[in-house]
Amino acid sequence: MIAILALGSVALAGCAAQEPEAPAKIAQKAPMSAARTLTMEQMCKDEAARRYNTEAQQIQVQGFEAFQGSYEMPGRTGREEGFTCTFDPEGQFLHLSMR
């Protein structure tokens, strides 16, 4: 009886064995070109200048970060008002968030 139970559990264990996992797929994206980054920075400055009713020269962009499939550019106005511009994966302007 014990031999039959042992044989049955071995057979069940074989059925429950998992197939080897497929290699994890890693999203690959082309690096953002310097020219495209500069275009995005200018769009961000123009949008912030319009929103804060100031000139684009008064706007400072303080970085460029990839964030969950999109890009963000934090910045400040000449009056120390913070904002973040958000772009889609292709570099198209999405929105400006005031901070």
Image: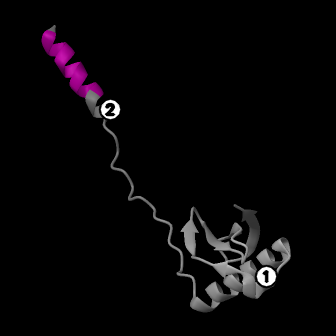
In what quadrant of the picture does the N terminus appear?
Answer: top left
Q: x%, y% of residue 57?
A: 74, 88
Q: Nearer the viewer, residue 57 or 8?
A: 57
Q: x%, y% of residue 18?
A: 34, 40
Magenta highlight range: 2-12
Camera-near label (1 vs 2) is: 1
Q: Nearer the viewer, residue 29 or 55?
A: 55
> Amino acid under label 1?
Asp
Please state if 57 lies on the left or on the right of 70 as rendered.
right
Q: Nearer the viewer, residue 42 or 93?
A: 42
- Disc 1 crowd rating (10 Å Cα; few below 14, some 14-19, many 20+) is some
* SS under mark 2: helix
Quarter of the figure with residue 6? top left
Q: On screen, 6 above or below 1?
A: below
Going 72% across and 75% down the picture, which residue do you hit?
A: 77
Which residue is tagged 1?
46
Which residue is tagged 2?
15
Going 67% across and 76% down the picture, which residue do you hit?
A: 90
Residue 8 colored in magenta in the image: yes
